[in-house]
Image (cartoon, rainbow, N blue to C red):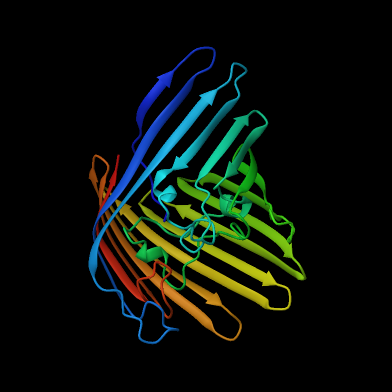
């Protein structure tokens, strides 16, 4: 799940020839969640997800420093994920039951290099269509949802990405290696742009990733377009396609709309997969109200013609508070 950690508390600061800092940030949720439809529709008799209380805690340690020559460096450690949660591609992280919940980066005039649990070039360049957040991510995990993860996590989830920005443009390349030596690396390329058009913030991104595993070649392509207007309305459009040798294409498109006024944000989105013989669709709704001081009241709903990736059935909802520290 993707959460925004808004507040940071410095734990240690020390200076000398080079400055360094260790900081801690936290995020917690309290509320209630429910759903309908069998949790696993392919296994008859599996009980539906019952309405239940919800709480979650996420703690992130951030390290940063700078060398005498001006080289910046840092690292992040997610203590919540280290507690045993798997990394889920559909929900926005890397794929599979792998645990690699830290990253290290170095940056300078040459650009920035990041290694670890980080986005590949496609995900780095292409924006999601979702606005706001819900404690069970109902609005962004329905059957039609996609998080532009590309092929991240195809192997061990350890990605190296190089990025460089010039003006309003940014470009990135990435690689993820198969430690077993069976498959070729996942290689990625991403390009993004953002600018202002008469008071409207406009953004665009395109990304591509490809790999070979034995006799199979697979590639992923994604494009995003976004606009945020001064009157509080915003729109995000996305498209993605997977091509697997001998198995044809899987195409996806989605649209997200949102409106923000004062402390209130309301968002809705729709996504659809074209699987060739059939389509899989879903839509989501989210309402956030900023209470100030790092507290946000949240409501989320998701509905699709197959199960949500949050494991709560094909129709899911949640309500509660998100608390940033």
Q: Position of residue 225 (x, y in %)?
A: 54, 57
> In the image, residue 159 lies at what x, y percent?
62, 48
103 on left or right of 49: right
Q: Residue 315: image x %, image y %?
A: 34, 75
Q: In which quarter of the image is residue 27?
A: top left
Say which residue appears at 70% left-offset and 60% top-offset.
Answer: 210
Where's residue 112, x and y in %? 62, 36
Quarter where residue 149 is shown: bottom right
Residue 321 appears in view: yes
Identity of the residue drawn at 62% across and 60% down: 154
Instruction: Name the side, left or right, on which 221 lies relative to 44.
Output: right
- Left or right of 277 in this view: 262: left
Question: Against 269, is 324 above or below?
Answer: above
**Picture quadrant of residue 26:** top left
Image quadrant occupied by the C terminus = top left
Q: Can residue 166 be seen in this view?
A: no
The foreground one among 148 and 37 is 37
95 in relation to 143, above or below: above
């Amino acid at each position: 799940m993707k959460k925004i950690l808004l507040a940071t508390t410095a734990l240690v600061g020390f200076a000398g020839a080079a400055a360094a800092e260790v900081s801690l940030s936290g995020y917690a949720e309290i509320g209630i969640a429910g759903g309908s439809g069998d949790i696993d529709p392919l296994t008859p008799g599996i009980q539906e997800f019952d309405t239940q209380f919800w709480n979650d805690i996420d703690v992130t340690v951030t390290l940063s420093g700078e060398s005498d020559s001006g080289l910046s460096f840092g690292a992040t450690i997610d203590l919540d994920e280290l507690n045993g949660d798997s990394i889920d591609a559909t929900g926005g992280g890397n794929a599979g039951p792998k645990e690699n919940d830290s990253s290290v980066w170095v940056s300078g005039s040459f650009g920035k290099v990041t290694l670890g649990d980080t986005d590949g070039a496609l995900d780095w360049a292409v924006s999601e269509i979702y606005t706001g957040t819900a404690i069970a991510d109902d609005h962004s995990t329905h059957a039609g949802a996609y998080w532009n993860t590309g092929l991240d996590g195809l192997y061990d989830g350890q990605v190296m990405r190089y990025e460089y920005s010039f003006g309003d443009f940014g470009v990135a390349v990435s690689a993820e290696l198969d430690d077993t030596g069976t498959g070729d690396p996942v290689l990625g390329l991403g390009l993004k742009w953002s600018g202002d058009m008469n008071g409207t913030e406009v953004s665009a991104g395109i990304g591509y990733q490809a790999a070979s595993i034995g006799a199979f070649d697979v590639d992923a392509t994604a494009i995003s377009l976004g606009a945020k207007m001064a009157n509080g309305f915003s729109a995000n459009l996305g498209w993605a396609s997977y091509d697997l040798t001998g198995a044809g294409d899987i195409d996806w498109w989605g649209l997200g709309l949102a409106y923000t006024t004062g402390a209130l944000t309301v968002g809705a989105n729709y996504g659809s997969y074209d699987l060739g013989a059939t389509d899989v669709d879903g839509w989501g709704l989210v309402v956030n109200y900023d209470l100030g001081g790092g507290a946000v009241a949240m409501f989320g709903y998701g509905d699709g013609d197959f199960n949500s990736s949050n494991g709560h059935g094909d129709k899911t909802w949640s309500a509660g508070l998100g608390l940033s520290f």
